[in-house]
Image (cartoon, rainbow, N blue to C red):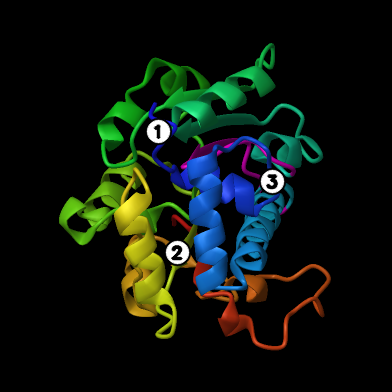
Amino acid sequence: MDPSRASVARVYDYLLGGAHNFSADRDIARTLEAIEPQARAIAAANRAFLVRAVRFLAAEAGVRQFLDIGSGIPTQGNVHEIVRGTAPEARVVYVDRDPVAVAHSTALLDGDPNAAVVQADLTRPADILGHPTVRKMIDFDEPVGLLLVAVLHFITDEQDPGGVLAELTAPLAPGSHLAVSHGTHKQETGEAVTKVYRQAVAQGEPTLRTAEEIGAFFTGFDLLDPGLVHGPLWRPDPPGDVPDDPSRFWFLVGVGRKP
């Protein structure tokens, strides 16, 4: 780990109000805030989508095992904490490439038999699916909740995100669900944000994609209501808790079910 290089997970942690970040991460986060004053609100809304989606999967869809890839640094509303309110027996495996995220997750989960963390790279699906911890914790003959929240846009087109997803979802049993949030185009600030990441963040710049491109990630899944929408519009709780202009939160989200 090079603390002089910013990390996506640690920048996100800072924007969420966390303390597990370094000076380089804070510098980048503040630069992002100067470009996009909504940066903290966008991060919070993205996290809120994760909470609502996981709560739905556990309480309504009956999912009892979760694979959270690009999980980041632990904060309030972690997946295992959300599902335990509905199903104490549910199993959760977190996956991240950032060593700080993995270290903090390992400390948080110490002694928890139904939750674990794996250090692995999303662009190498076989390493994730074949990891001994994943094979021990996840039964691929039963439905799985696959969570890819704010991570697919860090896979370039050359790295073939569609192929990565196809490999990840192939072993999932019918009744499995896929939850995705992904940065989309915002003309005024999108290029400026990607430039910041390109110059300074270790994992590279985000690739902002259109609704059509993001929707294609749900190939093989039935997209559930309300479809692919801006983050705050996905099953808001309470229903009236929607900002005046949801498009200001420039990420699209959706949850699909494998038939």
Q: Amino acid at mark 1?
A: Arg
135 or 41, which is in the foreground? 41
102 or 55, which is in the foreground? 102
Q: Which residue is mark 3?
A: 58
How far from the left and from the top, in percent, is residue 88?
77, 29
Q: Amino acid at mark 2?
A: His
Assess disc 2: are there few (<14), some (14-19) or many (≥20) residues with their C-alpha within 10 Å of its C-alpha: many
Could you tell me which quadrant the N terminus lies in?
Answer: top left
Assess disc 3: are there few (<14), some (14-19) or many (≥20) residues with their C-alpha within 10 Å of its C-alpha: many
First along the sequence among labels 1 and 2: 1
Report, in whole angstroms, how far the alpha carbon at label 1 lies from the one at label 2. Answer: 18 Å
Identify which residue is drawn at 36% across, 51% down: 200
How far from the left and from the top, in percent, is residue 34?
55, 70
Instruction: Verify whether residue 64 appears in magenta.
Output: yes
In the picture, measured across the screen, residue 31 lies left or right of residue 161, that is right
94 or 4, which is in the foreground? 4
- Picture disc at residue 182: 2
- Picture disc at residue 97: 1
Magenta stretch in the rendered image: 60-76
Which label lies toward us, 3 or 1? 1
Q: Amino acid at mark 3?
A: Ala
User: Residue at the left extreme?
Assistant: 158
Majority secondary structure of magenta residues: loop
How far from the left and from the top, in percent, is residue 185?
40, 78
Identify which residue is drawn at 50% across, 74% down: 228
Q: Is 233 placed above or below 108 here?
A: below
In the picture, measured across the screen, residue 83 lies left or right of residue 225, that is right
